[in-house]
């Protein structure tokens, strides 16, 4: 199965066509793409529109502000918390538009890192691959983005699966510094914030492995359980129920039930990895 088989075919909203046309006049803009939950049938009424402006040189903040004022009732221009970006609340609908500005060479390097060099991360290893795959192209000056998507549309590499398991499995329970061990220490200290932090990190690596086992590029941090159950065939038994039990047990003052359920979750994944020949008994 090719990665592109997971992609839908959404209708492009007129708002995005108008916004793309505003940015396309800048000669440094190479491509404009729409991605995020609204392009792959996982959105809700609170979802915003994610636009990616690929440019060879910066677009002046003043020019970005001028475009925003044509559409938005509220705006934040030149946020630098994650990727360089602007955020709008559109005047007519109240919907959010999140614009991110990317260098084409940077995203090419990230796709090569994943699909050519098979380099895994601690959690979310293939999110940028998914992002490129599920993007809907709104503007492509010289066909660069089409070529990038063609490169991204390939079967899930076996070496990448192995790398993701090798990177993420040992830190679930196996290593001295594994998340389960860190959770026990946090519980012993009654450090509730650390318990939450380490639980989130454990689940990030856990889901990274599950998506890899199923040859599914990682769709990102939102609606993870929903996405796994929708896109993946090979998952630990009763996964949704067990995840919800873990979340519910976090309110336990003793945390004994919580830690028991965390260990059971990891053990179930271990058995699946053995069944799929990624681990040996």
Image: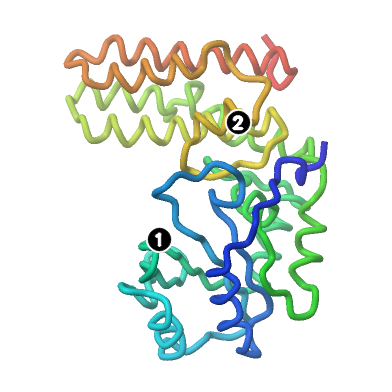
Q: Nearer the viewer, residue 74 or 187?
A: 74
Q: Which mark is residue 95?
A: 1
Looking at the image, is mark 1 or mark 2 earlier in the sequence?
A: 1
Q: Does the residue at mark 1 contact the one at mark 2 (Cβ under 8 Å)?
A: no
Residue at x 74% of width, y 68% of height: 145
- Nearest to viewer (mark 1 / mark 2): 1
Question: 76 left or right of 267?
Answer: left
Q: Which mark is residue 158?
A: none
Based on the displayed image, in which of its 4 quarters is residue 181 positioned?
top left
Question: 23 left or right of 176?
Answer: right
Residue at x 67% of width, y 60% of height: 136
Q: Is residue 15 above or below residue 198?
A: below
Quarter that holds the N terminus: top right
- Secondary-structure class at tag 1: loop
Tell me residue 113's x, y (percent): 69, 55
Based on the displayed image, in which of its 4 quarters is residue 79 positioned?
bottom left
Q: Is residue 212 above or below residue 70?
A: above
Alpha carbons under labels 1 and 2: distance apart: 34 Å
Residue highlighted by disc 2: 209
């Amino acid at each position: 199965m090719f990665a592109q088989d997971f992609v839908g075919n959404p209708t492009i909203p007129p708002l995005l066509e108008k916004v793309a046309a505003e940015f396309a006049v800048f000669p440094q803009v190479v491509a404009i793409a729409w991605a995020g939950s609204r392009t792959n049938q996982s959105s809700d009424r609170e979802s915003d529109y994610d636009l990616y402006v690929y440019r060879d040189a910066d677009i002046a903040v003043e020019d970005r502000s001028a475009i925003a004022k044509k559409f938005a009732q509220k705006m934040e221009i030149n946020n630098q918390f994650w990727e360089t970006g602007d955020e709008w609340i559109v005047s007519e609908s109240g919907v959010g538009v999140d614009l991110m500005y990317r260098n084409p060479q940077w995203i090419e390097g990230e796709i090569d890192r994943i699909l050519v060099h098979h380099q895994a991360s601690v959690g979310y290893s293939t999110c940028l691959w998914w992002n490129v795959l599920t993007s809907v192209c709104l503007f492509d000056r010289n066909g660069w983005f089409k070529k990038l998507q063609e490169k991204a549309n390939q079967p899930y590499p076996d070496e990448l699966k192995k790398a993701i398991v090798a990177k993420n499995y040992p830190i679930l329970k196996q290593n001295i510094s594994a998340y389960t061990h860190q959770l026990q220490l946090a519980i012993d200290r009654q450090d509730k914030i650390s318990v939450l932090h380490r639980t989130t990190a454990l689940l990030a690596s856990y889901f990274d492995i599950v998506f890899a086992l199923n040859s599914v590029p990682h769709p990102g941090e939102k609606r993870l359980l929903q996405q796994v159950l929708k896109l993946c065939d090979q998952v630990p038994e009763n996964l949704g129920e067990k995840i919800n039990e873990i979340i519910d047990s976090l309110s336990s003052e003793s945390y004994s039930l919580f830690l028991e359920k965390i260990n059971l979750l990891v053990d179930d994944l271990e058995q699946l990895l053995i069944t799929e020949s990624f681990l040996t008994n």
